[in-house]
Image: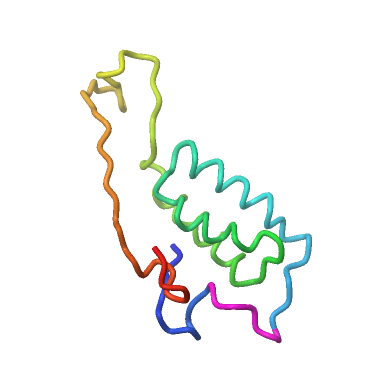
Amino acid sequence: MIVRTLDAQRDPFRPKEDEEEILEPEFHYLSAFGTLLYLAQCTRPNISFAVNLLGRYNNAPKCRQWNGVIGIFRYLKGTTDLGLFYTHESPNVATLYGSRIDFCLVGYTDAGHLSDPHRARS
């Protein structure tokens, strides 16, 4: 996953350095980002923060952002049992892996004010 840090040299979202080059078209960065955006909006909201950070660099992605995309895909491959499952049954009962379960939607939030350490915004 993508991790923010207060150390400017280790932050993967620091400003572009002079020796960095923009990715070539054969990397298909926008196609991979579109796939991640679909997953973040429909079935995997746990990756939405990282995907939104990568979306800031769609105009001129660099190798750092491509490594972030690859890292999210590796995370998704390792957590295939997580996600939102939509069923056609009654809204209070779902069947998951052959067993009926009662469910309700529970949401949590983290109000971390160091999400953007360079501008100190939430």
Magenta stretch prevailing secondary structure: loop
Which quadrant of the structure image shows residue 7?
Answer: bottom left
Image position, residue 60 (x, y; %): 71, 66
The mark tally for this picture is 0
Considering every residue shown, the one lying at the far left of the view is: 102
Query: Between residues 114 and 38, which one lies in front from this camera angle?
Result: 114
Q: Is residue 14 magenta?
A: yes
Colouring method of the image: rainbow
Q: Is residue 112 magenta?
A: no
Query: In the rendered image of this protein, does residue 29 appear above or below residue 90?
Result: below
Query: In the rendered image of this protein, does residue 20 appear above or below residue 85?
Result: below
Tell me what residue is drawn at x 60 percent, y 78 percent: 15
- Left or right of 28 on screen, residue 104: left
Image position, residue 4 (x, y; %): 42, 71
Which quadrant: the N terminus?
Answer: bottom left
Which quadrant of the structure image shows residue 116?
Answer: bottom left
Considering every residue shown, the one lying at the far right of the view is: 25
Which quadrant: the C terminus?
Answer: bottom left
Tell me what residue is drawn at x 39 percent, y 30 percent: 85
Q: Which residues are magenta?
A: 13-19
Query: Between residues 90 and 49, which one lies in front from this camera angle?
Result: 49
Tell me what residue is drawn at x 47 percent, y 76 percent: 118
Query: In the rendered image of this protein, does residue 44 appear above or below residue 115?
Result: above
Image position, residue 84 (x, y; %): 38, 35
Tell me what residue is drawn at x 70 percent, y 86 percent: 18
Image position, residue 12 (x, y; %): 52, 74
Which quadrant of the structure image shows residue 99?
Answer: top left
- Left or right of 110 on screen, residue 34: right
